[in-house]
Amino acid sequence: MNPSAASLPLQSKPGETAPGAPVLELDRLYHRWKGPKPPVLDDVSLTLRAGEVTWVGGRNGVGKTTLLRLAAGILLPQRGSARIGELTSEARGGRYQRLIGFLSAGDRSLQARMRVTQQLDYWARLAYVPRNRRGALVAVSLQRFGLEEFAERRVDRMSMGQRQRIRLAMAFLHEPRVLLLDEPRNSLDDDGYQLLNEQVQQATVRGATVLWCSPRGEDRVIACDASYTLTEGHLGRVE
């Protein structure tokens, strides 16, 4: 599996977290890339709550993707911690990562020669979805993101917007407790954006938490419960 697409998510149990209760807790995260530059994240703390959408914005290269990768357990923190309940991102066996769906920015994680249905089934296997549920979840995912008419088309014969829908369907397929979305509107038309909003809303209704990262200003056009800006390694609340 390409870790930039998502990190071994697992089916969550509806109702296991009360609305507003902490789900993902990021505590004093610190990360610095090699070289003379200052840390990209410096003592960043953030609590994501059940049933809520949190937006983090900032200019390109400020550290939003690094924050998401630390939250997903793709990167391990140099200092601080990422925790879901009693599980930290350093837990063995991918138990933490299985609770997360991660959409990376860009167009990676797709197998060019697979048909759309094959791609989603392949992802369901990587996400440890039980065999007896895979077919139903793949069918639901095709419907959720308007991909039914393209189900048997090869991925490399899809437009960029259609590929983005596939990648979103992969992130949402297993109904994870935590959804981490890096610039999810990329390449989507109005219909695709509406489908995305609908699925974010449905995820929060079932008690998931959503972290949406994108350039500054997008919080004005999406529905979010809390907004932050990442600047020079620090996270500031937008009122």
Image (cartoon, grey):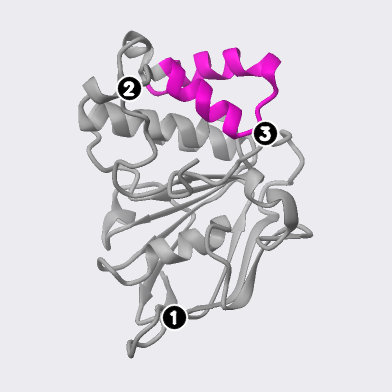
Mark 1 crowd level (few <14, some 14–19, many ≥20, 10 Å Cα): some
- Extreme bottom residue here? 36
Relative image position of residue 172 (x, y in whole percent):
51, 34
Q: Which residues are magenta?
A: 117-145
Mark 3 crowd level (few <14, some 14–19, many ≥20, 10 Å Cα): some
By secondary structure, the bulk of the magenta-drawn segment is best described as helix
Separation (CA) of disc 1 from disc 3: 33 Å
In the picture provided, is 139 more to the left or to the right than 13? left
Q: What amino acid does circle 3 point to? A: Gln
Q: What amino acid does circle 2 point to? A: Arg
Question: Mark 1 sits on what residue?
Answer: 32
Dot 2 or dot 3: first in sequence order is 3
Is 113 a magenta residue?
no
- Between circles 1 and 3, the one closer to the viewer is 1
In the picture provided, is 84 more to the left or to the right than 69? right
Separation (CA) of disc 2 from disc 1: 37 Å
Q: Secondary structure at mark 2?
A: loop
Dot 1 or dot 3: first in sequence order is 3
Dot 2 or dot 1: first in sequence order is 1
Question: Mark 3 sits on what residue?
Answer: 11
- Quarter of the image with the C terminus is bottom left
Relative image position of residue 167 (x, y in whole percent):
39, 34
For image coordinates 30% across by 13% down, the residue present is 153
For residue 5, which numbered disc appears in the image?
none
Question: Mark 2 sits on what residue?
Answer: 113
Mark 2 crowd level (few <14, some 14–19, many ≥20, 10 Å Cα): few
